[in-house]
Amino acid sequence: MKKDPKKQDHIYAEALRLFAEKGFPDTTIDDIVDAVGVGKGTFYSYFPNKEAVLLGLIKESFTQAQKAIAQSYRLSGGAAENISRAFRAHIKFFQRQKDFIKLLEWVKVQYFSVITTLFMDCFAQDLVRYREMIALEIKAGHMRRIDIDVFFLSLMGISHMFIFREIKMGIPIREKDLKHIQDVILHGLLIASGSSKNHQESK
């Protein structure tokens, strides 16, 4: 049977709403089909089980986030500027995804490895691009020698902490908070002007 993209999107939308409201474990396929207004047979023609809906939602959200971050990239910008742009684009995108963030809260422990794999797959090309930019800056003596993967995982962790706090606790993300975070992160990564020679000599 040929799948209708609009119907599939409708299933995704209602499932996401229910997962966010009731939690993934307590949402049944019956709940989803009742909300969508279709029979179980129709559901199973699109998804083999409830978990497939969950993983499809996560992959789609990460794919859209990747597009938002990719659009923030500037070819003329340096590593620090593009990291800053990516950080802000990441936060701005997920601020609008309240139900998705609530869903992640329900499933982040049980599906941690799957979520991490989907995240890394979706952002693989971006990570390669930023790795190359940072590697060039390190070679030029403008940035410290760091584990780039750990750096980006830390950056994503910080951004999601602020997003979760806003959505779960109602504490808004302020512009001065973003500026402070960027200042701390980027000044920890950058080598102060005039100190690169000393840094290179100390290696």
Image (cartoon, helix red, strand yellow):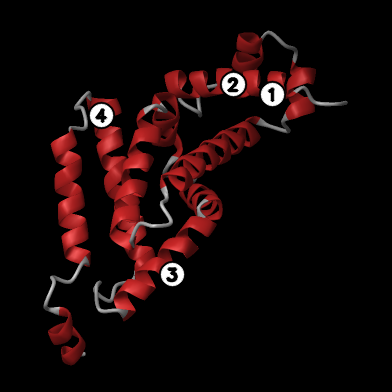
Q: Residues within 10 Å of mark 4 (few under 14, many from 20)?
A: some
Residue 9 placement, left or right of 69:
right
Q: Residue at x 21, y 59 (%)?
A: 186
The spot of residue 107 in percent (x, y) is 45, 37
Q: Which mark is residue 132?
A: 3
Q: Are marks 1 and 3 in contact (CB under 8 Å)?
A: no
Residue 29 placement, left or right of 3:
left
Nearer the N terminus, badge 2 or badge 4? 2
Q: Which mark is residue 28?
A: 2
- Of discs 3 and 2, which sits in the foreground? 3
Q: Amino acid at mark 4?
A: Glu
Residue topped by disc 1 = 8
State the CA–CA distance, disc 4 to disc 3: 33 Å
Q: Residue at x 56, y 54 (%)?
A: 121
Residue 30 placement, left or right of 178:
right
- Of discs 1 and 3, which sits in the foreground? 3
Nearer the N terminus, badge 1 or badge 4? 1
Establish if 96 lies above or below 107: above
Element assignment for label 3: helix
Q: Residues within 10 Å of mark 1 (few under 14, many from 20)?
A: some
- Of discs 4 and 3, which sits in the foreground? 3
